[in-house]
Structures are given as C-alpha cells and as structure tokens.
Image (spheres, rainbow, N blue to C red):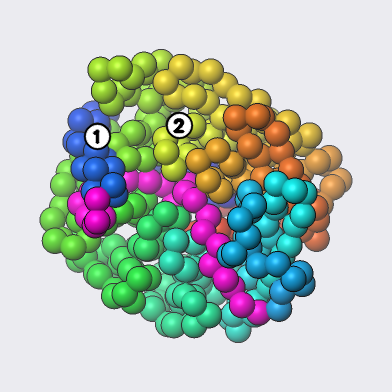
Amino acid sequence: MSETLTRVLHERADGARLGSIDVDAITRAGARTVRRRHGTAVTGLASALAVVGTIGALGLGGTDRHERDAATSPTAVATVTWASGTYLHTEWLERDGWSGSSSVDLGHQVSAYVRTARGYVLTDGQQIWSYVDGHLSHVGTVEGFFPSSTFQLVGDTDGTLAAWLSERGPVVLDLATGEVHEFPMRGVASVLAVDGRAVYVNDSQGVSAIDVDSGSVTPLGSGSPPLAFEDGRVAVRSSNGNLFVPATGPGDRAPTGLEHSNGVATFSPDARWLAVTVPTSDDGHRVKVFDPDHGTPVMLPTGSVSAEGYEWVDDDTLAVLSLETPSSHYRLLACTVSEPSCAVAVPDLGEGRDDGGNGVRFVLPIGEPYFPYPHG
C-alpha cells in the first residue's frame, strides 16, 4: 500500500467532479460476474482493486529450501510473496505451524509487480514481462516516467487479467492465453482495477468499465472514483471524508461513516470484509478491517507501531506490512480477521523505514514501488 497510491487517490478524489457514481450499474455488472463465475465461463463486467484477491500457489520453481511444496499442501493457510532485486520470494504458513519458502531468479530487476491466479506481471521500470509456469515473456513497455502517478500495474488475483496504462489508453494482458488487448481511449487518467473480464478506468467522463472481450465501454458515473470495487460492491468516500459502502440489495445494511479516510480501501474477495489503511500524523499507517454491512471494526493484533494491509490472501486473511518499532526492520504478517489473529510470515525484510528513505529495496505485489515517506 504505497504512499504514492494513497496520495494519488486522495488528490483525484478531492479534484473530481461532484457528480454521482452509478452504483446500480456497478452492482449489475458485479452481479452478472458472480452468476457467471458459478457457471462454466467468466465473462462480462466485474470489479476489484488490484491489491485484493486469493493467492494461488503457483509453483515458482527455483530453489525450494523445504521438502514440502505449497502447491500440493492440503493444510496451507496463507501464502505471501515479495520481491528483492531479481528474485521473487514465496512464504507459506500452515495450520500445523510448519512453514516453507521458495525463491526464483527472474533475471530482471523487479521494480513493481502484481499477481493473478495464472501468474505474475512485473516491470523493471522500462520493460514489462509476464511470468507463467516458469516462463518469462516480454509483454510491453513502460511509457513515460517510472515511478509516476500515471503508471501502475493492476491484476486480478482470482482471475487471469492484468492491466496498465499506455500513452494510447489501457492495455490488458490475459495470462491464460498470452493475448494483449489495447483500447485506444483519450483522457484516461488511470487504470483503477481489473476483475473477471473487465477493466475499470478513470477517464475524462468519470469512471468507466471496459469489457475486454467485446471492447464495449460502460460509463459508471462522474463522481469521485470509488476506493474499492468487488463483485458489485463499492467503497466510496463522501464529501466530508467518510467512507461508506452503499447497499446492493434489499437485505443489505449500508452504514455511513465506516472510517474518515484519505487512504486506501480493499475488499476481501467475497466482499465480506473491507480493509482500510490510512496514514497517521507520525508518518506511520494504521489498518482497520470493517464488516461493511454492520459497520463493526475488527482490530488486528499486529503488535506494530505502523501497519498497512496491502493484499488479501484469501476471503479471511489479510497480508500486512508491519513495523514493530520505529527502529525495527519491516516484516510481513498474515492476519486472520475472523479470529482475529496475526502470524509472522516474514520476520525481517532486511530494512526498516529509516533505512529506506524515499523508497525501499523490497517490492510488494501492489503494482508500484513502496515509499515509506511522503514524496513529491
């Protein structure tokens, strides 16, 4: 959950036109996708932020430091990935307390990456590659400056699509087929999310959904871009800064004021939970998880002076970047919301906030570099 993303979303929300997002259109799109996921094909429009989803064990190859394989383990609870240099690392935890890890050398500097259920998409800041089944393929080029507020990778962690923005418009890669789809569009400021067979963009008309297969574009409204999408549910920030989740059906409750937020929100894959990460006055972050239907917050026992929920591991598990004390090195936690409890997945990432300055050396699957401090 980088400061870049937090700041950019905040600025765009503040500067957006005060129209209204068509929540009904988003809900209809999400409902269609849910029904089709229960069938034999996944088509139509769906929505999700890049940093939510279910981590699939992908069999990275490389050198396993343990005998058991996360891809075949029946007791795997959480799988966490991160990158450093040219290496992609995986750590998994299991119910019996056993843990394992693996690393693979991708042969290129990993400056940013995202996951999908089929593989990974990564960039060194100039070129873009996919990594699927142990094979690295060149799929695109970063246009313009990197890092910047206009370029970010997004991925569907329970689907096969990833996307980014070129100077001509959104680019979508299907990792299941290797097909690259380009959608020439003027006025696109950012790619917000990709899920199912749809990509969501913030363009000159507001928020729009592009059906990747048909190329059709559906305007969803001209208000502030939602901070989170998931299967027809959205988290929206009101003019007074309160985060709320509109009801999607007659039986849903939709309390307002879940959080006064200028940060980033992410739904769990089943939209049962909403994690909200906001900056604090001491340059840190705090994370809360809400039941969006009842407004009840869950406080995760991170034991941290600063904690950021950056990715959903599954429907009930949130991956958290944790700074235990101001002088500590960063660590990665896997937090089970329903208990609530947190287990240490990676005890030491090799540097802390003070070591990192304007950027750290490790990379998280958030589609952009992580910056521990505000920057221009």
Cα distance in 3D space between marks 1 and 2: 15 Å
- Tag 1–tag 2 contact (CB < 8 Å): no
- Which residue is outermost to the front? 74
Question: Magenta stretch containing residue 349, yes or no?
Answer: no
Front one among 259 and 60:
60
Residue 324 coordinates in the image, percent (x, y): 81, 41
The residue carrying pointer 2 sits among few (fewer than 14), some (14 to 19) or many (20 or more) residues within 10 Å by Cα, namely some
Which tag is nearer the camera, tag 1 or tag 2?
A: 2
Whether residue 299 is situated above or below residue 266 in the rendered picture: above
Q: Going 70% across and 34% down the picture, which residue do you hit? A: 341
Front one among 251 and 243:
251
- Secondary structure, magenta segment, majority class: loop
Q: Going 31% across and 22% down the picture, which residue do you hit? A: 247
Front one among 323 and 27:
27
Q: Going 34% across and 54% down the picture, which residue do you hit? A: 194
- Is residue 291 toward the left or the right of residue 31 in the image? right
Region rendered in magenta: 39-62
Q: Which numbered dot is residue 272?
A: 2
Residue 302 found in image quarter: top right
| Type of amino acid at the residue the image marks with label 2 | Arg
Mark 2 element type = loop
Name the residue carrying label 1: 27
Q: Going 56% across and 29% down the picture, which residue do you hit? A: 289
- Is residue 160 toward the left or the right of residue 22 in the image? right
